């Protein structure tokens, strides 16, 4: 519903004679219209819904027209289901290849939040074609990309499929000047840590607190200080927001109050004006000032509301624990903080997130801790969460360190059956199955925890770590920075090995003499599985420092809570 609203809102649809909008859910839609049009994702569950409606009409002896529009693409399996249900002849099917929604001047989203669970948990490759199609569309618009880099299994598959599409339609982009010099594809599972951290840049905090949906956010009465809630579009056109979105939250209040004083001063100018100046002021400036005033009060309201919520949750203590986990000291204290978090039943999603952060930074939990935390969690929040643990384990988010002998017992059985050389290979296969996160080693290698003498100045950030209060440089952003510096993966072999991506990193450079220096400063970063506002802020900062301009393409904007909900079997 949200992406549709951004493209064609209800009033536009009404102008085109759409009678009513219904949400596809379990209950039947009661409509008197002669035509029903379903705009759905290609999911079997949705097909059953359509079929049940059509069959109900048949029983009641109604005849109407049905159209099913699949977005972003049509799957054969869906048509099969319609056929099985005996309604394939009654409906006409179409597809709407809608894959890119510009949320902002530098942010494109595919609005596929389900991508993360489908691919990284279920191993379902259904959306890879959609990604390839989106990249193909971009290259037809902006010419070929001279330099391509990527890391991760999904990145590699998407890239190869996209290349195949390019070859099939050879000649379309040939001879065009490239407008975007670099493209970087990155899988979310290369860096789960960044996505699991609490965000402290303004835009990230607004997302964590109020949920930004498809570029806009609903601010409730506690923000608007009226009885109505207000839907606000958050992008570069909101002048107030644009100046604070990438700032660390500690600077935002100061900035807003300064802005309020400036505004007041501009209002006060009208005191000594004559009629002519007054007329000019009213016709030219007043509207802008009023608009700015409205935005300012909204963002001040949002800040106050965030402050209230965060003070109630004891945010400082939480951040301290996260930083300790990232840096790898006081692990016992952090573990008992997490236990207390679970026992006080603060929030099932938050507790899960902290457990995952502990697991990934520690390369899996020791069996004793794993069992104890899991037991406490299930007793505190309910046994229905049991399946969620199995999901997190499969995705490598919350794992148990295998004691040295568990693999070998299995391996020795296997190796008796096969020769030693093959057994070696099988052993490798076993150890790669237990996804290791090696976060500590990667963090040392890439210098992710900045050594700071004295205070870290958040007002004048010196590196990307400011998005996490100077405690941690996002791994994903650091990898991108390193590869762009080297123009390849050379010298990063050790990092790739630690990331379990030795086979999954690629570079493809074409000898493009046509690429202008202007285009080589433009970098398209593609996040497969979602990216957070903190990563976007960090790369915007890197761009300002190094003279690059980043454009982001993501399957959806995500944050720690969305990741956890995607893995959860208990629907909130």
Image: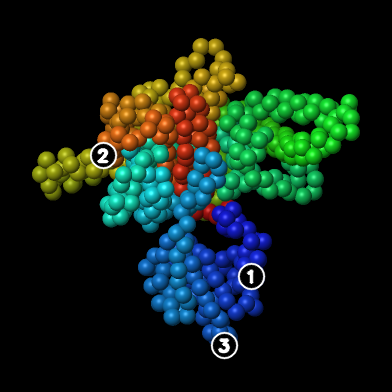
Say which residue appears at 46% left-offset and 44% top-offset: 554
Of pointers 1 and 2, the one earlier in the residue sequence: 1
Q: Residues within 10 Å of mark 2 (few under 14, many from 20)?
A: few
Query: Residue 61 shows which numbered tag?
Result: 3
Q: Residues within 10 Å of mark 3 (few under 14, many from 20)?
A: few
Residue 438 x/y as whole percent: 36, 31
Query: Residue 17 shows which numbered tag?
Result: 1
Q: Is residue 359 visible?
A: no
Taking the image as shown, residue 389 lies to the left or right of residue 456, namely left
Q: The N terminus lies in which quarter of the figure?
A: bottom right
Can you name the residue that lies furthest to the front here? Answer: 276
**What is the spatial separation of the Cα atoms under label 1 and label 3, in whole angstroms?**
25 Å
> What kind of element bears circle 1?
loop
Say which residue appears at 53% left-offset and 54% top-offset: 570
Of pointers 1 and 3, the one earlier in the residue sequence: 1
Residue 356 x/y as whole percent: 47, 38
Say which residue appears at 48% left-offset and 23% top-offset: 545
| Quarter of the rendering containing residue 181 | top left
Residue 479 x/y as whole percent: 38, 30
Residue situated in front as seen by the camera: 277 or 361: 277
Is residue 147 shown above or below 24? above
Residue situated in front as seen by the camera: 485 or 203: 485
Of pointers 2 and 3, the one earlier in the residue sequence: 3
Query: Residue 436 shows which numbered tag?
Result: none
Residue 298 x/y as whole percent: 73, 39
**What is the spatial separation of the Cα atoms under label 1 and label 2, in whole angstroms?**
53 Å
Residue occupied by mark 2:
503
> What kind of element bears circle 2?
helix
């Amino acid at each position: 519903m949200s992406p549709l609203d951004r493209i064609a809102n209800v009033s536009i649809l009404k102008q085109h004679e759409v009678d009513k909008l219904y949400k596809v859910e379990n209950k039947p839609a009661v409509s008197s219209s002669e035509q029903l049009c379903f705009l759905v994702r290609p999911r079997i569950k949705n097909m059953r819904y359509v079929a049940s409606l059509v069959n109900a009409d048949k029983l009641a002896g109604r005849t109407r027209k049905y159209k099913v529009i699949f977005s972003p693409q049509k799957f054969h399996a869906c048509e099969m289901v319609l056929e099985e249900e005996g309604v394939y002849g009654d409906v006409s099917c179409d597809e709407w290849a809608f894959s890119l929604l510009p949320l902002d001047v530098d942010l494109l989203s595919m609005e596929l939040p389900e991508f993360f669970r489908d691919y990284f948990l279920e191993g379902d490759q259904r959306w890879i074609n959609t990604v390839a199609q989106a990249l193909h569309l971009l290259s037809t618009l902006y010419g070929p990309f001279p330099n391509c880099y990527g890391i991760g299994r999904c990145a590699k598959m998407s890239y190869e499929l996209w290349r195949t599409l390019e070859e099939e339609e050879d000649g379309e982009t040939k001879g065009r000047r490239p407008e975007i010099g670099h493209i970087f594809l990155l899988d979310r599972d290369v860096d789960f840590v960044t996505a699991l951290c609490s965000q402290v840049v303004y835009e990230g905090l607004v997302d964590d607190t109020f949920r930004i949906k498809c570029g806009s956010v609903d601010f409730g009465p506690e923000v608007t200080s009226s009885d109505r809630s207000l839907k606000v579009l958050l992008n570069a056109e909101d002048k107030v927001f644009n100046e604070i979105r990438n700032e660390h939250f500690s600077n935002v209040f100061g900035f807003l109050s300064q802005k309020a004083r400036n505004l007041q001063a501009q209002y006060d100018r009208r005191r000594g004006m004559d009629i002519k100046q007054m007329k000019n002021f009213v016709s030219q400036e007043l509207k802008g000032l009023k608009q700015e005033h409205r935005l300012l009060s909204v963002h001040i309201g949002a800040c106050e509301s965030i402050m209230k919520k965060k003070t109630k949750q004891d945010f400082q203590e939480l951040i301290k624990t996260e930083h300790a986990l990232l840096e790898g000291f006081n692990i016992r204290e952090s573990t008992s903080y997490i236990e207390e978090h679970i026992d006080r039943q603060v929030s099932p999603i938050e507790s899960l997130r902290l457990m995952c952060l502990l697991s990934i930074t520690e390369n899996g939990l020791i069996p004793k801790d794993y069992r104890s935390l899991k037991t406490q969690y299930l007793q505190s929040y309910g046994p229905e969460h049991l399946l969620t643990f199995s999901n997190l384990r499969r995705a490598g988010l919350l794992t148990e360190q295998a004691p040295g002998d568990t693999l070998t017992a299995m391996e020795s059985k296997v190796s008796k059956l096969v020769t030693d050389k093959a057994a070696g290979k099988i052993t490798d296969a076993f150890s790669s199955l237990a996804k290791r996160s090696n976060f500590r080693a990667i963090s040392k290698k890439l210098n992710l925890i900045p050594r700071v003498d004295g205070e870290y100045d958040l007002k004048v950030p010196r590196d990307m770590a400011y998005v996490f209060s100077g405690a941690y440089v996002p791994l994903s952003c650091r990898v991108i920075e390193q590869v762009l510096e080297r123009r390849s993966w050379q010298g990063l072999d050790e990092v790739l090995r630690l990331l379990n991506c030795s086979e999954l990193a690629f570079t493809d450079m074409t000898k493009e003499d046509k690429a202008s220096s202007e285009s080589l400063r433009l970098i398209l970063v593609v996040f497969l599985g979602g990216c957070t506002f903190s990563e976007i802020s960090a790369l915007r900062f890197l761009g300002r420092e190094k003279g690059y301009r980043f454009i982001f393409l993501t399957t959806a904007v995500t944050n720690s809570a969305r990741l956890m909900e995607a893995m959860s079997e208990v629907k909130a």
